[in-house]
Image: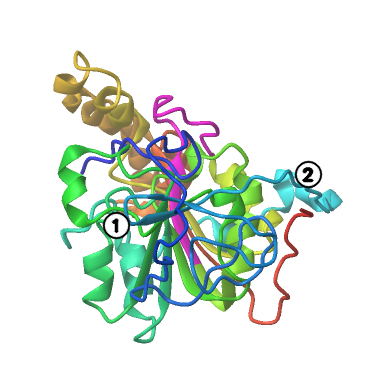
């Protein structure tokens, strides 16, 4: 498995090859996309993706891709309760655990974890999946082939590995901190290897909670011990992941370290051309690191420890952390920031 990040992010360098539509040009309606969009500045529902009738904002295009970045400043506030400030209040026994399946399988979708794949398999046909940081749009065909409706977003059409450009690219260019999507409008948000690239990850998580329908899922992963890459901001521990999701008001179902992507391997794989050929040393180092804990548990239990018993040990040296969360069925949508 190779998790080395693609060269895109969900909130970073803005596209430069965009232009505003001129008078007399056809409006951008994108009938292939679901009717879920709203102005990223004033939150007015959009019937076309080139103009907001409420704030009179005209949006650019990058080729056929609408460019819906915010222009207005926003005030952001948080309600912090005392228990959020102590790691002792994290329900580690019910949150820090592995799903029944995890790790990247051989389904052919880049970065897709088996645990996330299982959640997608349980969604009803027609469910809307919003991907943040979609890169080349490589999840589009995989999700559509399973009867799901796909919307891919990113900040650029060209900050992606060459081999990913064949998948069609993003449907909309936008900022994860100000999603141009209506409240309560999507069934799942997917963001693999993205959250480390966000300047304000808690703010973006609250946007996810806002656009999800009650019971909707947030599936994602973020760097932990990977190198600083692609202008990344916050590499997240399990505790940091928990706090990010909790501040958004999401119900946290699973937070887990990626087993086949230990930090030892990530550092060599993503280091440079000199370290990549010796990434096998990372697997050797990881085995050497795990062995004392495995033997201690083996002597105690008389059986080889499973992955759950090694959760904390793996978590300390994980290359990345993954999660499954959902918006509670009864909770109101989080209020958007003041425009």
Residue 306: horizontal and vertical position, in percent? 34, 55
- Between discs 2 and 1, the one toward the N terminus: 2
Camera-side residue of 316 and 121: 121
Is 140 drawn above or below residue 73 in the view shown?
A: below
Examine the image and state in which quarter residue 240 appears.
Answer: top right
Q: Which residue is drawn at the image coordinates 61% and 57% (left, top)?
A: 40
- Up-down: is 74 above or below 276? below
Q: Which residues are magenta?
A: 218-236
Residue 112 is marked as 1
In the foreground, 255 or 208? 208
Question: Would you identify the image quadrant in which residue 44 lies?
Answer: bottom right
| Above/below status of 3 relative to 58 | above
Q: Residue 170 location in percent, x, y?
A: 34, 55
Q: Residue at 65% x, 57% y: name it.
A: 206
Give the side of residue 158 with respect to residue 10, left or right: left
- As helix, strand or loop, the secondary structure at mark 1 comes to loop
Badge 2 is on which residue? 85
Q: Residues within 10 Å of mark 1 (few under 14, many from 20)?
A: many
Q: Residue drawn 22% across and 58% down?
A: 109
């Amino acid at each position: 498995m190779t998790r080395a990040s693609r060269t895109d992010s969900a909130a970073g360098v803005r596209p430069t090859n965009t232009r505003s539509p001129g008078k007399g040009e056809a409006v951008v309606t994108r009938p292939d996309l679901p009717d879920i969009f709203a102005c990223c500045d004033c939150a007015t529902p959009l019937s076309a993706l080139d103009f907001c009738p409420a704030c009179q904002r005209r949006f650019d295009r990058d080729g056929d891709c609408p460019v819906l970045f915010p222009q207005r400043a926003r005030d952001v506030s948080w309600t912090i309760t005392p228990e959020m400030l102590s790691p002792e209040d994290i329900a580690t026994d019910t949150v820090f655990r592995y799903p029944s399946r995890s790790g990247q399988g051989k389904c052919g979708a880049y970065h897709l974890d088996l645990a996330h794949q299982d959640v997608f398999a349980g969604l009803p046909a027609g469910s809307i999946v919003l991907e943040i940081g979609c890169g080349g749009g490589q999840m589009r065909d995989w999700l559509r082939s399973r009867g799901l409706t796909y919307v891919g977003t990113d900040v650029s059409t060209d900050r992606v590995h060459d081999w990913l450009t064949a998948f069609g690219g993003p449907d909309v260019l936008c900022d994860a901190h100000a999603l141009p999507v209506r409240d309560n409008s999507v069934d799942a948000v997917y963001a693999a290897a993205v959250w480390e690239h966000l300047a304000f990850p808690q703010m973006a998580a609250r946007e996810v909670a806002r656009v999800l329908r009650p019971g909707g899922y947030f599936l994602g992963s973020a760097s932990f011990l990977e190198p600083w890459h692609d202008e990344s901001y916050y590499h997240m521990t399990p505790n940091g992941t928990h706090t990010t999701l909790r501040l958004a008001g999401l119900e946290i179902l699973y937070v887990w370290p990626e087993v086949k992507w230990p930090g030892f391997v990530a550092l060599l794989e993503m280091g440079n051309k000199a370290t990549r050929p010796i990434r096998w040393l990372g697997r050797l180092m990881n085995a050497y690191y795990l062995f004392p804990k495995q033997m201690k548990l083996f002597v105690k239990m008389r059986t080889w420890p499973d992955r759950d018993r090694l959760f904390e040990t793996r978590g300390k040296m994980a290359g990345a952390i993954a999660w499954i969360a959902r918006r509670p069925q009864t909770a109101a949508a989080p209020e958007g920031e003041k425009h």
